[in-house]
């Protein structure tokens, strides 16, 4: 499929006749597997997952052995991206805006088969340059930069083996949190620190030398601020309806 960023699916009709537009929330990174115009693939192997934010922070993978798979009509009639534990995307400088705006909120719709990082830096051991966010294990999430670790509990509202709506919240100077399907885990660990440009560049799925994520990702949206309760509710209502979570 050829990428056509001039005509991506930006809006969705709501039941009240209005439309939801993710761009109204000024995402810094936005990856939407349902929009096949953002996917460059050959026989299902993806070399580029294009960013819909307008900042052109595309996710790429030039090595065929490490290219994730595009699955058609997989969830709620929509396409998803499948990672098998060896596949990942390079974001280059695509997360380096966090060096200026470390406060961020990340929304992810995913069905994970392993409990590993979803996004962050390539290189470990570099303090505020080594962001790594996702899962720690079957009982905890991971909301870390090297030397500043937070492991919020995975609560009962998380559906094991199914698609979930996750929200990772990184508030500089305050404790971080993770929401599963709208329910918070509770504040954990030290206050979240400032960040610097990602060591080795940013990545999806293969982060800081730890095991590579195995599972399916439907959509990732990252904001450069802490979403208010109303903003988060609107985005999550849209994503859960869209993906049937």
Image (cartoon, helix red, strand yellow):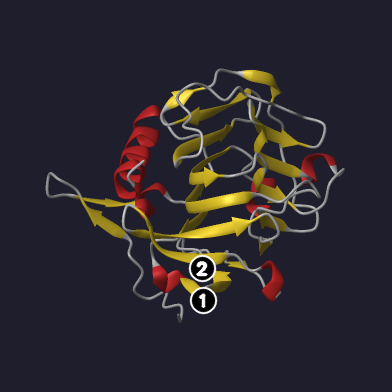
Task: Assign a secondary structure to mark 1.
Answer: strand
Which residue is depicted at the point 38% across and 54% down? Answer: 23
Label 1 crowd (10 A; few <14 / some 14-19 / many >=20): some
Q: Position of residue 231 (x, y in %)?
A: 37, 36
Whether residue 62 is visible here, answered yes or no, is: no
Q: In the rendered view, tell whether residue 36 sits above or below residue 105.
A: below
Q: Earlier in the sequence, mark 2 or mark 1?
A: 1
Q: Is disc 2 in contact with disc 1, using a CB cutoff of under 8 Å? A: yes
Q: Position of residue 31 (x, y in %)?
A: 49, 58
Q: Position of residue 109 (x, y in %)?
A: 46, 45
Viewer-closest of 17 and 139? 139
Disc on res. 143: none
| Between 132 and 55, the one nearer to me in the picture | 132
Q: Quadrant of the C terminus?
A: top left
Q: Can you see residue 240?
A: yes
Q: Residue at x 66, y 70 (%)?
A: 61
Work out whether 236 lies above or below 220. Answer: above
Secondary element under disc 2, as helix, strand or loop, is: loop
Q: Residue 128 location, x and y as percent?
A: 78, 40
Q: Nearer the viewer, mark 2 or mark 1?
A: 1
Q: On the rendered structure, is 141 left or right of 201?
A: left
Q: Determine the residue positioned at 78% across, 45% down.
A: 130
> Which residue position holds label 2?
50
Quarter containing the N terminus: bottom left
Q: Residue at x 69, y 47 (%)?
A: 99
Is residue 30 shown left or right of residue 87?
left
Q: CA distance from mark 2 to mark 1?
A: 8 Å
Q: Residues within 10 Å of mark 2 (few under 14, many from 20)?
A: many
Residue closer to the observer: 214 or 190: 214
Which residue is disc 1 drawn over?
A: 40
């Amino acid at each position: 499929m050829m990428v056509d960023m001039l005509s991506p699916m930006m809006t969705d009709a709501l039941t009240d006749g209005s439309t939801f537009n993710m761009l109204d929330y000024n995402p810094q990174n936005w990856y939407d597997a349902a929009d096949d115009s953002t996917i460059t693939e050959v026989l299902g192997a993806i070399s580029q997952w294009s960013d819909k934010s307008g900042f052109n922070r595309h996710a790429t993978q030039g090595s065929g052995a490490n290219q994730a798979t595009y699955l058609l009509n997989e969830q709620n009639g929509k396409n998803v991206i499948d990672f098998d534990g060896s596949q990942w995307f390079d974001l280059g400088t695509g997360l380096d805006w966090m060096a200026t705006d470390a406060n961020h909120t990340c929304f992810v719709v995913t069905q994970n088969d392993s409990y590993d990082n979803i996004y962050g830096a390539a290189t470990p051991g570099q303090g505020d340059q080594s962001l790594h966010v996702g899962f720690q294990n079957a009982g905890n999430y991971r909301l870390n930069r090297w030397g500043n670790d937070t492991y919020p509990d995975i609560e009962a509202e998380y559906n094991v083996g199914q698609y979930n709506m996750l929200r990772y919240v990184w508030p500089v100077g305050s404790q971080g949190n993770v929401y599963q399907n709208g329910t918070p885990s509770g504040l954990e660990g030290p206050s979240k620190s400032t960040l610097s440009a990602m060591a080795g560049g940013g990545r999806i799925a293969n982060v800081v030398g730890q095991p590579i994520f195995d599972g399916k990702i439907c959509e990732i949206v990252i904001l450069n601020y802490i979403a208010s309760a109303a903003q988060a509710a609107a985005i999550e209502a849209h994503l859960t309806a869209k993906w049937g979570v």
